[in-house]
Amino acid sequence: MSDVPPPPCEPPSHERQQLLNKRVPELTRIYREARRPLETLGVLEVGHFLEGEYAEWLVCKLFGLKRATRNTRDYDAEDTRGTRYQIKARVLRDGSKNTSWDFGKREPTGFNYMIGLIIEADWTVQLIICVDRPTVIAQKKPEQKDWRFRWSSKTAADRRVVNLYRAANG
């Protein structure tokens, strides 16, 4: 067994879950609509994703984590015990429930757990999971060039995947 402390597996309190129901989905829709023309004009860089920023903020608020500084590489948040979390989000616009959280070409290091969010196109959070780093690493197939954690019905049933939050309609 690993000597890494267990993830924050307790579901967020009712008070903290209220963060999921606030005006954030409405405000993110407005932001995205305003962002497109600004990208076209060259005012904003294309490729800085709001869902990642939102996911980091939300997970830190829900689970009482401290967000890493902007220039920190390899992890996004830390708890009071020093456990490090890589936070990944995916917005599903086509209604699909299969997706992946990508890490790029470099082996993921520097974190103990990945917290993955699935967000619907209307910015409501459907799912939050937590997976330890060895499970993330074990999922890579030799023929894959990039590192990713694939979400499917098979991984949903994996006992190493901790379901932290699932929307009532999810």
Image (cartoon, rainbow, N blue to C red):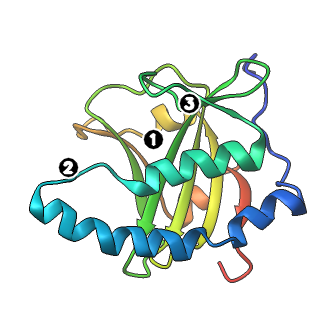
x then y, percent, for residue 157: 65, 60
Residue 165 as seen in the image, left or right of residue 143: right
Task: Give the residue number, with chain letter if any, for mark 1.
Answer: 139
From this viewpoint, is residue 18 visible? Answer: yes
Residue 99 horizontal/vertical position (percent): 41, 62
- Tell me what residue is drawn at x 82 percent, y 54 percent: 12
Q: Residues within 10 Å of mark 1 (few under 14, many from 20)?
A: few
Q: Quadrant of residue 124?
A: bottom right
Residue 9 numbered tag: none
Of badges 2 and 1, nearer the viewer stands 2
Of residue 16 and residue 129, the one placed in the foreground of this image is 16
Compare marks 2 and 3 and give the one earlier in the sequence: 2
Identify the image quadrant of residue 5.
top right
Of tags 2 and 3, which is closer to the observer? 2
Query: What residue is pinned by disc 3?
Result: 133
List the single residue furthest toward the right.
14
Going by the numbered disc 3, the residue's amino acid type is Arg
Residue under circle 2?
Answer: 45
Foreground mark, 1 or 3?
3
Instruction: Estimate the x, y position of residue 64 in percent, counting from the top left.
Output: 77, 39
Vertical position of residue 143 compared to residue 153: above or below: above
- At a point 70% along the width and 73% down the height, the residue shown is 167
Distance CA(mark 1)–CA(mark 3):
10 Å
* Secondary structure found at label 3: helix
Instruction: Identify which amino acid the numbered label 2 is placed on.
Output: Glu
What kind of element bears circle 2?
A: loop
Look at the picture and state if 48 lies above or below 99.
Answer: above
Q: Quadrant of the C terminus?
A: bottom right
